Amino acid sequence: MSVASATVTPESRGLARDEVRLAVVTPGGTEHTVAWELPRWLEPGDLLVVNTSATLPSAVDTAHGPVHVSAELDDGSWVVELRRADGRGPRTPSAGEVVALPGGVRLRLVERHPEDQTRLWRAVTLPHESRVDYLFTFGRPIRYPYLERPVPLHDLQNVYATTPGSAEMPSAGRPLSESVLVDLMAAGVVVAPLVLHTGVASQETHEPPQPEWFSVPDHTARLVKLTHQHGGRVVAVGTTVVRALETAASGRTEGWTGLVLGPDRPARVVDGLLTGLHEPEASHLRLLEAVAGRELVDRAYADVTGPDAPPYLWHELGDSMLLLP
């Protein structure tokens, strides 16, 4: 297998963000190229949809280990994950536990969120704190165990990120530099925004995504419809965009989405997907298969891990794949 984890940013490896590898996978085969060549593979009239959610410094250090803050619910309570002191796994607290946070704030665990899992908790802050304001004051970026060193928050932002809210970076868009976006628009590709605030992922159990807040602007929804009417393709930058667009297609364009895509609930709106390269565990592959089908996804991973492939790197600071079924 010719894939390893990306342990530092592309910039630390001497690359620009748009110089990471890109595997372009179509029914006709796989081409190994680089991200700045993305405009070659899209056509005039195609629609590229990006997630403009910005990454928050969502880890808060406490005496008993980090607290990862996943979301803020409509009632002002937070969704949190309490990590072990070494940061390498969740710990199992009890309802009613109170955690002392920096700044004289106490966090009281209320109940599991949702009820049928053991990792995330709904919690209230005493006194009440806005998640975004508090994290920008006391938080740091969530750090993954495969990284050699902490990564500054500005390196965990997409160039078009405008709306703070994601616990972890919507990393599929990281290779899209300003120059790539300009080249796409010059080639007749329309770029449209939406927002989906990502929650904390499960690195250990590979759970499906939890409910996340999203908003699809009216003009983006109209562009999706017009693109299909005129024979163009809707290409999502990341599975967060797929989740938001597919939820909006049911008639609800803002709020919390619990939609989980997979072979039994395939994508009906999205025709292509730009995604990061991640270890091929079950929940991630199901999301990719929902867009591209199992046969194409299986071949894609075989092609990027095969002995003749160039050396690809996994995870959010690694390389990318464009699936065009």
Image (cartoon, helix red, strand yellow):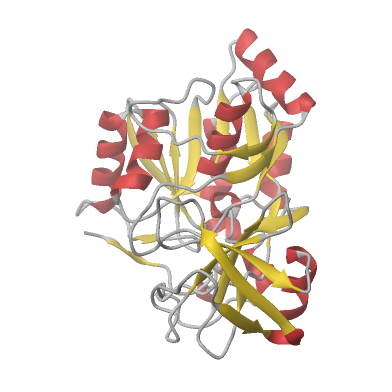
Image quarter hosting the C terminus: top left
Judged left or right of residue 235, residue 279 is: left
The count of marks equals 0
Report the residue that reaches farthest toward the top: 229
Image quarter hosting the N terminus: bottom left
Q: Where is residue 100 shown, x and y percent of the image?
A: 64, 85
Q: Nearer the viewer, residue 95 or 174?
A: 95
Q: Where is residue 25 shown, x and y percent of the image?
A: 38, 35
Q: Where, by quadrant of the figure, is residue 165 drawn?
A: bottom right
Q: Where is residue 33 shown, x and y percent of the image?
A: 44, 47
| Residue at image location 59% in from the left, 52% down from the top | 198
Judged left or right of residue 233, residue 319 is: left
Q: Nearer the viewer, residue 70 or 18?
A: 70
Q: Nearer the viewer, residue 267 or 321?
A: 267
Q: Where is residue 125 shown, x and y percent of the image?
A: 70, 71
Judged left or right of residue 32, residue 103 is: right
Decide if residue 171 is in sight here: yes
Report the residue that reaches farthest toward the bottom: 63
Q: Where, by quadrant of the figure, is residue 216 drawn?
A: top right
| Residue at image location 70% in from the left, 85% down from the top | 102
Report the residue that reaches farthest toward the front: 96
Q: Can you say whether 203 is above or below 276 in the image?
A: below
Decide if residue 238 is in sight here: no
Q: Can you say whether 178 is above or below 63 in the image?
A: above
